Amino acid sequence: MKIACTYFILTTAYFLLSITSVWAQKNGETVFKETCVACHTIGKGKLVGPDLANVQNRHQQEWIINFIKSSQTVIKSGDKYADSLFKAFNQMPMPDHPNLSTDEIKGVIAYIQEQSAAPEPTTASAAMPPGDSKRGQELFIGNIRFVNQGAACNSCHNVDRKGFLSGGALGKDLTHAVGRLSASGVTAIISGLPFPQMKETYSSKPVTQQEIADLTAFLTDADKQDPADVFGSVGNYLLIGGACGILILLALYSVFWVKRKKLPVNFFVFKRQIKSA
């Protein structure tokens, strides 16, 4: 009876551990697809960030956990590999994920390990429709509204292009975003919303696949333009505007300085008094 009871307990414990392991992998899959897939692939080449296939073999688990939670903290600690990785991918900072627990990140690592052995096949539905650069430009500056009424891209981002309305400076300049990240990387960022401000702005008002294709086509054309045709960034506009303002003030000051009074206010009063005396 005692042996049977012990066997039952061990069997139950093993069953519960198996369920926990499977749950952790599923949870890791969910976290990966919600958080990581916008910038990383598993066995399909680099995107915005490096390919994560077999990352568990290249780094210790503790290092991966710390890097995911705050990559910049690891870089600033003097980690040479982390710094070289940051520089190799155009110094694009990986967003911090302090909201992810250690167990959730371990689940992601387990999912990556599983998929590294048998990566998910690419489905036909993942293919993007052809993009229209002109429509992408109109979407970017807000002349055409997004289907789901999201904010125009130039609310936060700028693209330097001759005859093109300059945008905001809250986000990164996107003139050569395709050159830095590749067209696939830009598409992945717009689709996956890896940055907190993007997620807050578009998670409830998602950009459609066609709109993503149009924006990517526009940014691809912007990247190909001759740098000599680029008028300047927002910072250049401010600098030139400030310089022009100073020149105008100096010119006005010179005009008024020419007309300055060269004699005392009471000079003619004193002169009349001397003459009458």
Image: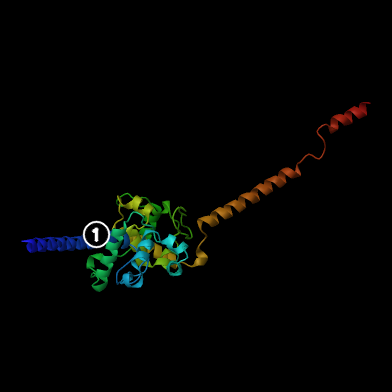
Res. 121 image quadrant: bottom left
- Residue 127 visible in the current orientation: no
Q: Is residue 267 above or below residue 183?
A: above
Compared to residue 75, the image places residue 98 above or below, namely above
Q: Residue furthest top?
A: 277
Residue 81, horizontal then vertical, whole percent: 43, 70
Q: Could you tell me which residue is drawn at 92 percent across and 29 percent down?
A: 275
Bin the neighbour count of mark 1 within 10 Å (Cα to Cα): few under 14, some 14-19, many 20 and up.
many
Residue 203 in view here: yes
Which quadrant is home to the C terminus? top right
Name the residue: 47% across, 62% down: 76
Of all residues shown, which one is farthest toward the right? Answer: 277
Picture coordinates of residue 207 (x, y %)? 31, 55
Instruction: Locate residue 20, reporting x and y percent.
Output: 20, 60
The scheme the figure's colours follow is rainbow
The residue at which mark 1 appears reads as 27
Q: Identify the image quadrant of the N terminus.
A: bottom left
Name the image quarter holding residue 126.
bottom left
SS state under label 1: helix
Residue located farthest toward the front when viewing the structure as drawn: 2
**Corner quadrant of residue 258:** top right
Q: Residue at coordinates 85% horizontally, 33% vertically from top-left?
A: 267
Tell me if 91 is positioned left or right of 190 in this view. Answer: right
Residue type of the residue flagged with mark 1:
Asn
In the rendered picture of this protein, how many numbered marks are placed on residues? 1
Q: In the visual, does 3 lie left or right of 215? A: left
